[in-house]
Image (cartoon, rainbow, N blue to C red):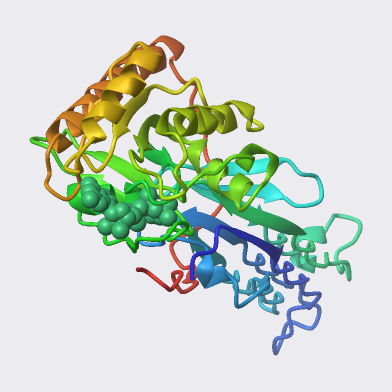
Amino acid sequence: MFVDRVELFVKGGDGGRGAATFRREKYIPLGGPDGGDGGDGGSVIVRADPNADNLAGLTMKKHWRAKNGEAGMGKKCAGKNAEGIVLLVPPGTIVRDRDRGNVLKDLVAPGDEVVVAKGGRGGRGNAHFKTSTNRAPREFEPGEDGEERWVTLELKVIADAGLVGFPNAGKSTLLSRVSRATPEIASYPFTTKHPNLGIVTLGGDAGFVIADLPGLIEGAAQGVGLGHEFLRHVERTRVLIHLVEPFPTDGSDPVHNYHAIRKELREYVVPLDGKPEVVCVSKAELTGANDVRDKLAADLGREVLLMSAVTGEGLQLVIGRVSEMIAALRRAEAVEAARKKPTEFPTEAAIRTDDFQTAPPPEGRP
Ligand SMILES: Nc1nc2c(ncn2[C@@H]2O[C@H](COP(=O)(O)OP(=O)(O)OP(=O)(O)O)[C@@H](O)[C@H]2O)c(=O)[nH]1
Ligand SMILES: [Mg+2]
């Protein structure tokens, strides 16, 4: 099961209450206040983990409550801080406050995390309230309440290149040829229902991540079919590989189909047609595919590649073009990043992550 959106209730544990006790010892009849502090409640944290590939692991349980801190005790003994909860999600998950709608954090890189519900601080015991005029205070603080809220987690895959095109164009077949991914492939449209990621390894460290996306159809930008769901995943790809089926089974014109997809990309909530694009006609070994390529190239006035995922013809060139574009974009991004010089802020310094209990990773790897 592939799940890319979940809604969860999260609550940090309450802080433990401080104690109001007095020292009681033989021969010390009037011992002073010795109430210890309460422990802090546990926090709920969402963390990006490279081993999680979708949000399916978070569908079984909607409410996540971290434990409360222990109450303080006599003899100035502090209550224990409670363990937190860490929810593991795939990189590319956007965490939002459901009711306010604001983004709490976009968990882009593995290890990125956000505290979604902070545990309450433990209350102080009466040992803190002793003054020169009140040597036997009975005051203590209750622990603070833990934060609580509803959050939505939404996964938008992050890939260097995204495969777009009509259903049945051969997108999944291409992915399976250039990476170790094993997407479902079939001779009918809409075989792919969710994005599949694959890693293309080239010499050295020049690899990139490619996403096979569900086929697009006319009207997708307005929500026809599962349009919005599909286009959402195109949002965070850097480069598009637009695969054009040379012989659509419905007899439609490949050139028209190319423009139809471009229109959907353009009309999506965030226009997606500005991304660099490699245009490629698929199924090259079929007679006449070459003519379709020439016709499309003439219509667009730009390079159109021709490739067969079955024979492997033209595959190298497609991968080469895509990787050149990605390399150029990465260089430009590096220059931009150096120019901006990031300002460093301390991260959630007070959060101890060493003794957190960990939620099970999402199930259902393909
Ligand atoms: N002859 C030929 N057939 C191909 C080639 N690539 C893919 N096919 C066939 O085209 C059909 C569709 O392939 P898929 O890879 O499932 O197409 P898709 O674009 O992922 O389709 P959706 O997931 O439905 O959008 C399958 O029957 C493939 O075997 C090719 O290079 N040559
Ligand atoms: Mg497919």
Q: Residue at x 72, y 67 (%)?
A: 15
Q: In which quarter of the image is residue 42?
A: bottom right
Pick whichever, 203 or 73, lies toward us. Answer: 203
Q: Residue at x 17, y 33 (%)?
A: 206
Q: In which quarter of the image is residue 223?
A: top right
Pick whichever, 316 or 211, lies toward us. Answer: 316
> Residue 250 appears at what percent x and percent y?
47, 48
Q: Does residue 206 appear left or right of residue 90 in this picture? A: left
Pick whichever, 130 or 97, lies toward us. Answer: 97
Q: Does residue 60 appear left or right of residue 128 in this picture? A: left
> Residue 180 appears at what percent x and percent y?
20, 56
Q: In which quarter of the image is residue 191?
A: bottom left
Pick whichever, 295 or 341, lies toward us. Answer: 295
> Residue 27 appears at what percent x and percent y?
71, 86
Quadrant occupied by the C terminus: bottom left
Furthest residue in direction left, as rendered: 203
Would residue 357 be seen by someone viewing this image from the given angle? yes
Would residue 322 be seen by someone viewing this image from the given angle? no
Rendered position, 60 above or below 300:
below
Q: Does residue 294 appear left or right of residue 23 in this picture? A: left
Furthest residue in direction right, as rendered: 133
> Residue 318 appears at what percent x and percent y?
21, 31
Q: Residue at x 54, y 63 (%)?
A: 3
Q: Does residue 223 appear left or right of residue 264 in this picture? A: right
